[in-house]
Amino acid sequence: MRVERRCLLWLLGALVVLCGSLFAGVSIGSVSVSVSDPIVHNLRIPRVLLGCASGAGLAVAGVILQAIVRNVLADPYIVGVHSGASCGTAAAILFGVGSGVGLQAMAFLGAVGATVLVFLLARSGGQLTAVRLLLSGVAIGYALSALTSFMIFASDSPEASRSVMFWLLGSLSLASWGSQLAAVFVVFGVVSCVVMLLAPHIDALCLGDTTALSLGVHPQRLRAVLLLATCLLIGSVVSLSGAIGFVGLVVPHLARRVVGASHRVVIPMAALLGAILVIWADIGARTILSPQELPIGIITALVGTPLLLVLIRRHPAPTES
């Protein structure tokens, strides 16, 4: 009972901080304006909402992927899903394959394509295991990152190439009211509900495939469902906010440190912390070199790296079996 009360207090505290962060994100900018100004409604509010959804989505994706491969170093970058979504969106921007919702479709197709490649590579010559998934994801991720770089250099439009380079480091500047922003929230809501329902099964998966089977959980089937959920999350987020790094790696660690290992509370805690981190990173990106805007991925990396090192030093991660 005491543990549950402590987790509830942490969740409520994070929710309060998130509400304050949303207000700060709307109020703080390179230019001081009244909250009734049109720029607040047309630009800042959708930007802050996108940051909230993106941070929460990336954090939940990180939690899922770390559970799938049973490795605390896993994140959307390492297992190739992020690289696939980035490659699909970069192709859409550089070669005019799609715009608007088309960008999200290309990002999702890229994420799915990367996942299929990872699955095929991981299953070749044996069972689909956590180690095979992790190693296959790293290989596919590097290959897709190289393909994205090739497309940038092969593009005939220097302006589009510069836009993609800035976008690859993350930016919320594309945020606006419309179907794209709504789609991100819908995808996040649906995926979050699904993974919350599967939280006990995810806990079993983290104990190992043999233990999961003894508890009535099919590891390979569950990994497939969770990877599809991750593709939806990463595809929708990356198509609008770009490649924001470190959120999916660092935030799950923070969530587990404060509420324990149960995914029933880790998932919502990670979502709240991820949203807070990205909102404040965006505030920094808009104000540090004002009026010039920094890519948000630079801020998350500068904050995430020392934070991760502190966590590792104070709480060494257990050795994976």
Image: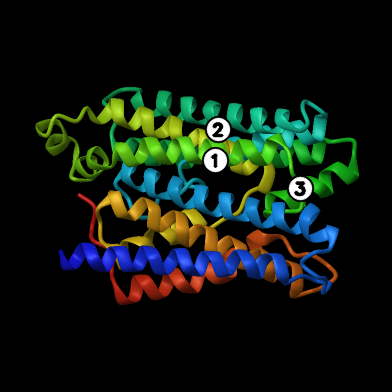
Q: Secondary structure at mark 3?
A: loop
Q: Residue beneath label 2, please?
A: 111
The answer to whether marks 1 and 3 mark residues whose Cβ atoms lie closer than 8 Å is no
Three-letter amino acid code of the residue under disc 1: Ile
From the viewer's perspective, is the residue at label 1 or at label 3 nearer? 3
Find the residue positioned furthest to the front.
36
Three-letter amino acid code of the residue under disc 2: Ala
Say whether residue 97 is left or right of residue 206.
Answer: right
Q: Secondary structure at mark 2?
A: helix
| Residue 144 visible | no
Above or below residue 10? Residue 215 is above
| Residue 220 visible | yes
What percent of the width, then of the height, locates residue 45? 71, 56
Q: CA distance from mark 3 to mark 2?
A: 20 Å
N-terminal of the pair, mark 1 or mark 2, is: 2
Q: CA distance from mark 1 to mark 2?
A: 7 Å
Q: Quadrant of residue 126?
A: top left
Above or below residue 245? Residue 298 is below
Query: Closest to the observer: 254 or 17?
Result: 17
Q: Quadrant of residue 130?
A: top left
The answer to whether marks 1 and 2 mark residues whose Cβ atoms lie closer than 8 Å is yes
Q: Residue at x 22, y 62 (%)?
A: 4
Q: Residue at x 23, y 37 (%)?
A: 201
* Number of on-image labels: 3
Query: Closest to the observer: 211 or 126?
Result: 211
N-terminal of the pair, mark 3 or mark 2, is: 2
Q: Residue beneath label 3, please?
A: 174
What percent of the width, then of the height, locates residue 27? 72, 70
Q: CA distance from mark 1 to mark 3?
A: 16 Å
